[in-house]
């Protein structure tokens, strides 16, 4: 079968031929219908050799959708032909966090060398993939896998981030979204669907700000050295009640810190290496700063319920497996509008 692999440190991903995997006991084999392309992949492929914690080559793709075509011994909770999506942050299934469905915060994943598909385990960017346990599969139903596969990360991650700030996002409040790309444009829709907050979106790209307005942002601003002043003006000097930074680079985390109001939340979602200094006089009084990771299994079910109700729609660009390296090039150049999706067999 064809697969997109990261084969050597410092090189671009390649399309290769590898054997079709067979499911072992407790495992599920999917025929992949769609796989998302993510900035996290680019971040992993930028690490020097000493920081790569898993062996290469690695089949990429931590956003996956497919149809069940085979199951291993002992699997009886999914059936052949089921259309599913893959919950990505796999855990041990037994620790106190996993027992709550919070496998994204599994306490033993590092110890047991459990890694997400595409980020250590073989991923979804192939014609077939193995899922380690059927509990990591969520029914897709009649939703289009191509348009909805990004929700497994680009939907779940902002949903988890926004959900914890819901008590602060009441009518009359303000939420700032920094970065209107793959995660940010979904985050804007989630904020509109779940809260009464006014949404201010920031980006360096006019095209992405146009997308932000298209999906519901009330105000859009260029992310520059004047952004904080403009946010303060728009909020009557109060600042934002919640800030969601989907870029996470030093210039954006600085904006996030400076535009946050008293008793606000600052959530750094992006993995661009930025940080927020916390202390008396450096942040507004009682500002809560967090850096979440993905979301829980139950939250992914909730995200897909929102999609079925039409409350969130992902803007996608589609590519075949052979075109996957081009998709990564466009993503790295900040040229993707929304989310890139690989469609095997297209």
Image (tube, helix red, strand yellow):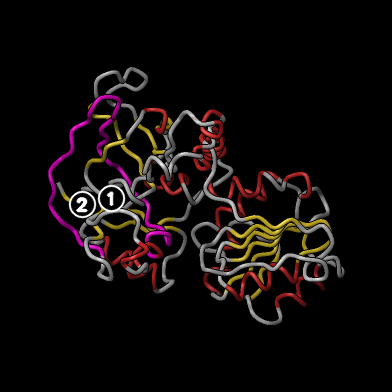
For residue 252: magenta? Answer: no
| Element at label 1 | loop
| Vertical side of 95 occupied by 231: above or below | below
Question: Which residue is tagged 2?
Answer: 3
Left or right, 188 with reference to 70: right
Image disc number at residue 74: none
Which span is picked out in magenta? 13-42
Real-space Cα distance between discs 1 and 2? 6 Å
Circle 2 residues within 10 Å: few <14, some 14–19, many ≥20: many
| Vertical side of 99 occupied by 335: above or below | below
Residue nearest the viewer, comparing 8 with 171: 8
Check if mark 1's residue and mark 2's residue have beta carbons within 8 Å.
yes
| Element at label 2 | strand
The total number of labels drawn is 2
Counting from the top left corner in percent of width and height, residue 327 is at 32, 64
Counting from the top left corner in percent of width and height, residue 265 is at 73, 56
| Vertical side of 163 occupied by 257: above or below | below
Left or right, 161 with reference to 31: right
Q: Residue at x 26, y 52 (%)?
A: 59
Residue nearest the viewer, comparing 151 with 141: 151
Left or right, 315 with reference to 209: left
Q: Residue at x 71, y 81 (%)?
A: 226
Q: Residue at x 29, y 33 (%)?
A: 67
For the view shown, which residue lies furthest in the front direction? 111
| Vertical side of 304 occupied by 340: above or below | below
For residue 16: magenta? Answer: yes
Counting from the top left corner in percent of width and height, residue 23 is at 22, 30
Q: Residue at x 76, y 48 (%)?
A: 196
Circle 1 residues within 10 Å: few <14, some 14–19, many ≥20: many
Residue nearest the viewer, comparing 89 with 14: 89
Counting from the top left corner in percent of width and height, residue 256 is at 69, 67
Image disc number at residue 125: 1
């Amino acid at each position: 079968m064809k697969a997109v692999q990261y084969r050597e440190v410092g090189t671009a991903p390649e399309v290769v031929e590898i054997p079709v995997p067979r499911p072992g006991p407790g495992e599920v084999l999917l025929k992949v219908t769609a796989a998302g392309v993510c900035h996290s992949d680019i971040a992993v492929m930028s690490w020097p050799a000493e920081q790569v914690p898993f062996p290469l080559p690695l089949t990429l793709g931590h956003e996956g959708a497919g149809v069940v075509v085979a199951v291993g011994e002992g699997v009886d909770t999914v059936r052949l032909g089921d259309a599913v999506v893959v919950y990505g942050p796999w855990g041990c299934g037994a620790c106190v966090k996993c027992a709550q469905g919070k496998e994204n915060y599994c306490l033993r994943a590092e110890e047991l060398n459990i890694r997400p598909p595409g980020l250590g385990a073989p991923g979804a960017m192939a014609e077939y993939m193995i899922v380690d346990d059927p509990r990591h599969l969520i029914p897709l139903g009649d939703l289009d896998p191509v348009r909805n596969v990004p929700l497994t990360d680009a939907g779940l991650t902002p949903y988890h981030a926004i959900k914890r700030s819901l008590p602060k996002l009441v009518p009359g409040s303000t939420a700032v979204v920094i970065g209107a790309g793959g995660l940010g444009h979904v985050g804007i829709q989630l904020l509109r669907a779940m809260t009464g907050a006014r949404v201010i979106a920031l980006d360096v790209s006019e095209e992405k700000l146009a997308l932000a307005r298209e999906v519901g942002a009330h105000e859009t601003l260029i992310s520059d050295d004047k952004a904080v002043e403009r946010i303060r003006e728009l909020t009557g000097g109060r600042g934002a009640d919640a800030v969601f930074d989907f870029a996470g680079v030093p210039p954006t985390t600085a904006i996030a810190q400076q535009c946050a109001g008293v008793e606000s939340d600052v959530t750094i979602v992006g993995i661009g290496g930025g940080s927020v200094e916390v202390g008396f006089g450096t942040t507004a009084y009682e500002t809560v700063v967090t850096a979440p990771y993905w979301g829980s299994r139950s939250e992914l079910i909730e995200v897909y319920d929102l999609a079925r109700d039409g409350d969130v729609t992902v803007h996608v660009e589609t590519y075949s497996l052979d075109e996957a390296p081009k998709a990564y090039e466009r993503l790295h150049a900040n040229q993707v509008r929304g989310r890139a999706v690989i469609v095997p067999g297209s």
